[in-house]
Amino acid sequence: MMSKKKRAVFFFFDLIMIGALMLLDRYTKMLAVSRLKGRQPYELIPDVFEFRYLENRGAAFGMLQEQRELFIAVGALFLVVILYFLIRVPCTKKYYALRICMVMIAAGAIGNLYDRITLNYVIDFLYFVYIDFPIFNVADIYVTVSTAFLVVLFIFIYKDEDLDMKKANKVKIHSSMVEVPESSKEEEDPDGL
């Protein structure tokens, strides 16, 4: 079994990364409020991409407007599941990409949940004019990109047994990993044949 200390270190690092990503999201939203609220959109690439302030009272891409309590409850439950998963996922290279995706999803969820709790809406400000894509924010990028990457991981990398955390956390010992003492070798074949 994996040591509790190693798990604690990985989980602590996960929390640090979630916090850093949340701070970046908060910073960009504060910039949007100070530079865009009540002003005309700022065209970064004319007719392609602009910064446009929006107070989104719905879910992703403006769906389900005015459902604040539902979003808070679902978001909180979702975070509990992700944090539990981060505690359980093995601390090996095979699962690093999975951990990173979960950290980014958690940071995005917390970033938008924070807005919903404190403001009653989510601050969105990134807009692809050319394709008329719904206005979004940095937290949305975390969630969307990570979810897409998770789909790729689940299709091409991880098998069902890889995601069984009880089995994945058990150390697998191969016979090549076991060292046989010299005295045992001599006892098996005293003549050296």
Image (cartoon, rainbow, N blue to C red):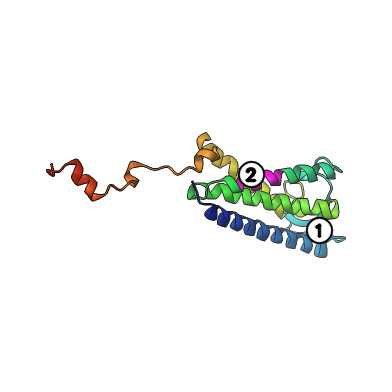
Side (left or right) of 176 relative to 40: left
**Dot 1 alpha-carbon crowd within 10 angstroms: few under 14, some 14 to 19, many 20 or more:** some
Nearest the viewer among 18 and 25 is 18
Q: Which residue does the numbered mark 2 point to in the structure image?
A: 147
Mostly what secondary structure, the magenta segment?
A: helix
SS for callout 1: loop
Q: Which residues are magenta?
A: 78-86
Q: Position of residue 17 (x, y in %)?
A: 63, 58
- Identity of the residue drawn at 79% across and 61% down: 32
Q: Position of residue 147 (x, y in %)?
A: 63, 44
Residue 9 shows in the view: yes
Of the numbered discs 1 and 2, the one sitting upstream in the chain is: 1
- Identity of the residue drawn at 51% across and 51% down: 3
Q: Quadrant of residue 23?
A: bottom right
Side (left or right) of 170 relative to 139: left
The C terminus, quarter of image? top left
Q: Position of residue 114 (x, y in %)?
A: 78, 54
- Identity of the residue drawn at 60% across and 54% down: 11
Task: State which mark lies toward you, 1 or 2.
Answer: 2
Instruction: Indicate whether 41 appears above or below 188.
Output: below
Residue 123 shows in the view: no
Q: Position of residue 69 (x, y in %)?
A: 84, 44
Amino acid type assigned to the residue bearing label 2 in the image: Thr
Q: Which residue does the numbered mark 1 point to in the structure image?
A: 41
SS for callout 2: helix
- Assess whether residue 179 is covered by the magenta stretch: no
Amino acid type assigned to the residue bearing label 1 in the image: Pro
- How far apart in space, not on screen, are marks 1 and 2 (Cα)? 29 Å
Nearest the viewer among 135 and 148 is 148
**Dot 2 alpha-carbon crowd within 10 angstroms: few under 14, some 14 to 19, many 20 or more:** some
Nearest the viewer among 166 and 94 is 166
Extreme residue in the top direction: 160
